[in-house]
Image: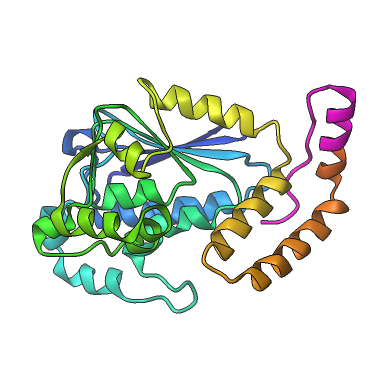
């Protein structure tokens, strides 16, 4: 089978691309499995500093390729089955696996960002979009709901009324409108270049500090204050004796670029 998800690692940054441009990077079952497997593989690389997610060709992703998926009904049940050890099925893990990575994930979006493609972008830590990109929670068009982790990420990013409206109407909004709503982090004429610039800024910070921040925000966004405070203390204690914290402090005092060791935790 063709591999429609590519991954190259250059200078400690993984460049992951959906590679089915002739179909606007419509997602197949194989691509969903490849996305999850790629994220799991990258998670084990402690030298990794960031991931940039993109789509080859004119679009990020037009969403699930229903013609391809429905052509193999026997595989749908397997993909839909819940994996208790992860709390997700194949559709959900293709997106949520990127939230599990202990490094920043930046999605660079142009063209279509529909349905499952939107849910993949929302699983990134940051989303950079062209002003004229098209964003839509498109599942309602097919009589469905977002079920690839999108309800969770929409709830984190948007007010409940806005999340309901986008989900119930399937309205298509531009990148500029998506930024105003809170779906998009930044708007750029060249979102990939913008993503690389953001990654370069993040590389100047301790990888252990970034990983701890991501764990805290992802794990405690909707928690009560006491549980969050306890987790803050736990993460901070580890960082206080971390060699990359020492490297960051030394670099700041000496006004020199920091030199970091591989991340301590996976």
Position above or below: 244 against 256: below
Q: Where 201 sits versus 159, above or below?
A: above
Q: Is residue 193 left or right of residue 31?
A: right
What is the quadrant of residue 37 in the picture? bottom left
Q: Where is residue 125 drawn, in percent x and y?
A: 49, 46
Seen from the viewer's position, the closer of residues 220 and 209 is 220
Could you tell me which quadrant the C terminus lies in? bottom right
**Most foreground residue, 66 or 139:** 139
Q: Residue furthest bottom?
A: 84
**What residue appears at the point 51 percent right and 27 percent down from the top-left corner?**
196
Residue 74 can be seen in this image: yes
Q: Nearer the viewer, residue 229 or 58?
A: 229
Q: Is residue 165 found inside the magenta-colored segment of the image?
A: no
Q: Is residue 48 left or right of residue 221?
A: right
The picture places residue 65, in percent across and down from the top left corner, at: 17, 51
Q: How is the image coloured?
A: rainbow
Q: Nearer the viewer, residue 47 or 124?
A: 124
In percent of the image, x 73 and y 69: which residue is there?
Answer: 230
Tell me the residue at 89%/32% (across/down): 250
State the image coordinates of residue 176 (x, y, percent, origin top left).
30, 31
In the depicted structure, whether residue 75 falls above or below residue 26: below
Q: Position of residue 19 (x, y in %)?
A: 30, 37
The stretch of residues the image draws in magenta is 248-266
């Amino acid at each position: 089978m063709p591999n429609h998800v590519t991954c190259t690692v250059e200078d400690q940054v993984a460049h992951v691309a959906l590679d089915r441009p002739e179909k606007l990077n419509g997602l197949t079952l194989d691509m969903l499995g490849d996305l999850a497997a790629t994220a799991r593989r990258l998670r084990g690389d402690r030298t990794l500093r960031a991931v940039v997610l993109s789509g080859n060709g004119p679009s990020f992703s037009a969403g699930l390729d229903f013609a391809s998926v429905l052509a193999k009904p026997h595989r749908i049940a397997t993909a839909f089955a819940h994996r208790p050890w992860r709390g997700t099925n194949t559709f959900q893990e293709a997106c949520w696996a990127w939230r599990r990575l202990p490094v920043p994930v930046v999605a660079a979006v142009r063209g279509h960002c529909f349905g499952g493609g939107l849910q993949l972008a929302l699983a990134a830590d940051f989303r950079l979009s062209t002003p004229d990109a098209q964003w839509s929670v498109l599942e309602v068009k097919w009589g469905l709901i977002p079920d690839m982790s999108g309800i969770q990420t929409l709830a984190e990013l948007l007010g409940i009324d806005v999340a309901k409206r986008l989900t119930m109407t399937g309205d298509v909004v531009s990148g500029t409108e998506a930024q105003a709503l809170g779906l998009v982090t930044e708007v750029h004429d060249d979102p990939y270049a913008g993503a690389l610039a953001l990654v370069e800024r993040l590389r100047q910070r301790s990888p252990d500090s970034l990983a701890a921040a991501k764990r805290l925000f992802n794990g405690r966004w909707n928690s009560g204050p006491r549980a969050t405070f306890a987790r803050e203390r736990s993460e901070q204690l580890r960082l206080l004796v971390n060699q990359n914290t020492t490297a960051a402090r030394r670099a700041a005092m000496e006004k020199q670029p920091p030199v970091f060791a591989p991340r301590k935790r996976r």
